[in-house]
Amino acid sequence: MKLTDFYNEVCTRVDTDKTAINAAVTKRVLSEAFLVLAAMDAAELADTMSKGLTNARKKMG
């Protein structure tokens, strides 16, 4: 998956009837998230990603 495809997939999931978020806002938030992740050392990054993926799997059921 290309980064643009990732951004677009996230955009389609977060823009709902209850929460109207446009593509530009979503892409900006993701860009900032990547900046935060890039500033982490490898161990902290791995721990953060592991926790995030664990939470995502719980939501998926």
Image: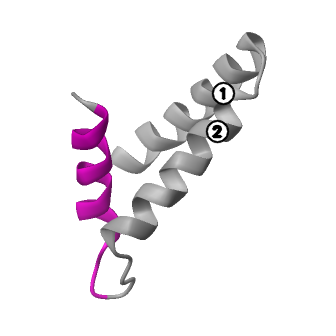
Gap in angstroms between the C-alphas marked 2 and 1 = 5 Å
Q: Which residue was labeled with disc 1?
A: 38
Which residue is outermost to the bottom? Answer: 18
Q: Quadrant of residue 46?
A: top right
Disc marking residue 60: none
Q: Quadrant of residue 20?
A: bottom left
Q: Is residue 20 above or below residue 7?
A: below
Q: Residue 55, how many percent across, how many down? A: 54, 42
- Looking at this view, is 59 or 11 the one in front? 11
Q: Is residue 30 above or below residue 41?
A: below
Residue plotted at (59% across, 28% down): 49
Q: Is residue 61 visible?
A: no
Q: Residue 38, how many percent across, how many down? A: 66, 27
- Looking at this view, is 28 or 21 the one in front? 28
Secondary structure of the residue carrying numbered label 2: helix
Residue plotted at (34% across, 75% down): 22
Magenta stretch in the rendered image? 3-17
Q: How is the image coloured?
A: one colour
- Looking at this view, is 8 or 48 the one in front? 8
Marks 1 and 2: in contact by CB < 8 Å? Answer: yes
Q: Is residue 42 above or below residue 51?
A: above
25 relative position to 54: left or right: left
Disc marking residue 35: 2
* Prevalent SS, magenta region: helix
- The C terminus sits in image quarter: top left
Secondary structure of the residue carrying numbered label 1: helix
Q: Is residue 59 visible?
A: yes
Q: Amino acid at mark 2?
A: Leu
Q: Would residue 7 be counted in the magenta stretch? A: yes
Q: Is residue 51 above or below residue 18?
A: above
